[in-house]
Image (tube, rainbow, N blue to C red):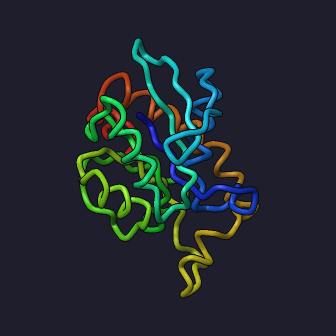
Amino acid sequence: MIVGLGNPGFRYRNTRHNIGFKILEAFAGKHGIRVGKKGYHGRYGIGRFAGREIMLLEPLTYMNLSGDAVEAVCSSSSIHPKEIIVIVDDINLPFGALRARGKGSAGGHNGLKSIIGKIGPEFDRLRIGIGRDGMPEDRSGYVLAPFSREERLILKEMIPKAVECVEIWVKNGIGDAMARFN
């Protein structure tokens, strides 16, 4: 299962916190997987990629409760946390940087904290750098702000690169993804 984190609603669509949704939607579009079914506290789609069935999930619980959606899928299916890749924004990485990681901590991210609280830390993460340049003391105001013009230009190159990273990850494993994209 590939999970893209973000917040539901038009208001948040083009914000830094929703980069997980953007990358998941780009992956889905490239591989013809419709993420339109409602259930599991989110929107999901099931399709085939690299010879296997995969589920794509966008939690619609707001970021801080993302674990509710991931837990709902895990408890009603045979998906184990070790078979999950979570795509998430990271203010500690420069804008546009990618960091593939296996199990670990939340690193201060509330969406990851929620997932870890529900299913444990055994899932993989693709952290997407949204940087800190110009970040005010109010961290939430920064992550919920829309992308700047310059950032949107970087996104045009970074999103396809992130999709390629996920493709390599699913095909060849996290080691290959880390070696190529970190």
User: Where is residue 55 drawn, in percent x and y?
Assistant: 47, 30
**Image quadrant in which you'd find residue 176:** top left
Q: Is residue 39 above or below residue 107?
A: above
Which residue appears farthest toward the bottom when viewing the image? 137
Name the residue: 63% across, 27% down: 34
Which residue appears farthest toward the top when viewing the image? 51
Nearer the observer, 61 or 26: 61
Residue 159 horizontal side relative to residue 100, left or right: right
User: Where is residue 76 drawn, in percent x and y?
Assistant: 36, 35
User: Where is residue 18 drawn, in percent x and y?
Assistant: 60, 56
Q: How many marks?
A: 0
Name the residue: 25% across, 53% down: 121
Name the residue: 50% across, 58% down: 89
Name the residue: 41% across, 12% down: 51
Nearer the observer, 29 or 156: 29
Nearer the observer, 120 or 71: 71
**Image quadrant in which you'd find residue 172:** top left
Residue 83 horizontal side relative to residue 126, left or right: left
Quadrant the N terminus occupies: top left
